[in-house]
Image (spheres, rainbow, N blue to C red):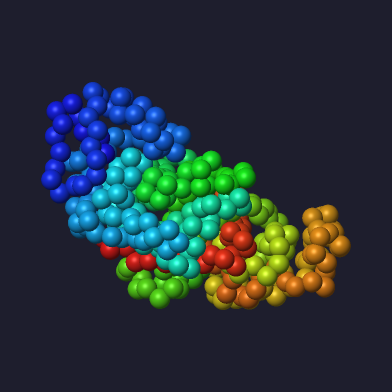
């Protein structure tokens, strides 16, 4: 934590304080100590940290997560410090706290995904009323820059993993390549274009509740389909990408753009129909793959008679996000094809 030149601090907080001359000196100090993600941070003054804790009704000493493998404890104070550093607003703090709860569950396998050479990033999908209240982007360039909530909430979680759990690139983080989602990765569902119930409702929460779902995602792969106007035609494009990713995947996020989602909605296709169709369609390579040269028989262990791409229909997690124009969707495979990690949904206590 950083104080200004006066050394003013509060007694509730227990983190070390470092006196500096001004904000620029503080920023450089954090670079020197290795407490950044390579970008400048906002100096976390005690007053700012207190405001973040108050916004989430959290006491500084409250344990909001324990990393199962190392037993490292994440307190509300440490989470708030990193949320300030990331550039969050205080009202983002309940989302950050819920995300920490989610990633520290056993089934998420946080230690595995953060030290693996495979280089997964932590993707947050926020659903429910809080997404609109905070202005979390679900539309144009949903995975791109330009939105404070998306950029800083995702960044806060990454800084917590780096600074509180000491999992930094080149140290415990051994990703061979990594990807931009390891800086920050946070989006919301585009509720107005959903053909079905939001993700948090599908996972047992009420429509008027809010939640964050965490995924251990590898690099996203865009799916372009600009000619088909039926659910089958649209989903065959997804099937081609999914089949090429591997076999027996336990979980994969299917991000459907509004243009594609409209065809599913018009045909009254349910979430389960989408999952079942993709499961059946990826048991063998879709014919279109061979026509386009995307997959050839005998490559690796992916012969046409081999196991399908998906372990079950439940392996598919479909959401809707993105701009209204352009038939570009995305599939995001999970770390170790989802066999060693499972997404976790947590209610946001706002």
Q: Residue furthest front?
A: 70
**Residue 56 versus residue 184 in the image, above or below:** below
Q: Position of residue 337 (x, y in %)?
A: 62, 63
User: Residue at 44% of width from left, 73% of height from top?
Assistant: 203
User: Seen in the image, is 280 located left or right of residue 18?
Assistant: right
Q: Position of residue 307 (x, y in %)?
A: 75, 73
Q: Point out the image quarter for the C terminus.
A: bottom left
User: Seen in the image, is 195 located left or right of residue 40?
Assistant: right
The residue closer to the viewer here, 130 or 42, is 42
Residue 165 visible in the picture:
yes
The residue closer to the viewer here, 291 or 107, is 107
User: Residue at 35% of width from left, 73% of height from top?
Assistant: 206
User: Residue at 83% of width from left, 59% of height from top?
Assistant: 299
Q: Point out the image quarter for the N terminus.
A: top left
Give the number of marks: 0
**Residue 47 versus residue 289 in the image, above or below:** above
Q: Position of residue 182 (x, y in %)?
A: 51, 46
Q: Residue 87 sits in which quadrant? A: top left
Q: Position of residue 331 (x, y in %)?
A: 61, 58
User: Seen in the image, is 74 located left or right of residue 70?
Assistant: left
User: Residue at 58% of width from left, 50% of height from top?
Assistant: 119
**Residue 2 versus residue 235 in the image, above or below:** above
**Residue 18 versus residue 196 in the image, above or below:** above
Residue 128 visible in the picture:
no
């Amino acid at each position: 934590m950083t104080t200004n030149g006066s050394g003013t601090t509060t007694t509730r907080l227990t983190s070390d304080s470092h006196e500096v001359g001004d904000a620029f000196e503080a920023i450089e100090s954090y670079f020197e100590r290795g407490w950044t993600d390579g970008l400048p941070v906002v100096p976390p003054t005690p007053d700012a940290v207190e405001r973040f804790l108050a916004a989430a009704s959290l006491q500084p000493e409250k344990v909001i997560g324990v990393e199962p493998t190392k037993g490292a404890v994440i307190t509300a104070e440490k989470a708030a410090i990193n949320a300030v550093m990331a550039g969050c607003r205080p009202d983002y703090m309940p989302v950050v706290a819920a995300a920490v709860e989610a990633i520290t569950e056993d089934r998420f396998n946080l230690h595995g995904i953060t030290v693996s050479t495979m280089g997964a990033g932590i993707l947050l999908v926020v659903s429910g009323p809080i997404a609109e209240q905070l202005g979390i982007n679900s539309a144009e360039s949903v995975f791109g820059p330009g939105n404070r909530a998306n950029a800083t909430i995702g960044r806060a979680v990454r800084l917590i993993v780096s600074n509180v759990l000491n999992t930094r690139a080149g140290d415990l983080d051994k990703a061979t390549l990594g990807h931009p989602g390891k800086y920050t990765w946070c989006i919301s569902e585009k509720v107005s274009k959903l053909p079905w119930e939001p993700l948090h409702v599908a996972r047992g929460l009420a429509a008027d509740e809010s939640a964050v779902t965490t995924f251990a995602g590898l690099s996203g792969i865009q799916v372009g389909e600009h000619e088909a106007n039926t659910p089958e035609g649209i989903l065959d494009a997804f099937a081609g990408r999914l089949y090429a990713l591997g076999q027996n995947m336990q979980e994969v996020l299917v991000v459907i753009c509004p243009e594609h989602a409209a065809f599913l909605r018009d045909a009254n296709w349910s979430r389960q129909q989408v999952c079942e169709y993709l499961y059946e369609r990826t048991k063998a390579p879709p014919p279109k793959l061979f026509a386009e040269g995307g997959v050839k028989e005998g490559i690796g262990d992916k012969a046409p008679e081999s196991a399908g791409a998906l372990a079950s229909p439940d392996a598919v997690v479909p959401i809707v996000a993105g701009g209204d124009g352009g038939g570009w969707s995305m599939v995001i495979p999970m770390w170790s094809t989802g066999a060693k990690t499972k997404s976790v949904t947590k209610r946001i206590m706002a």
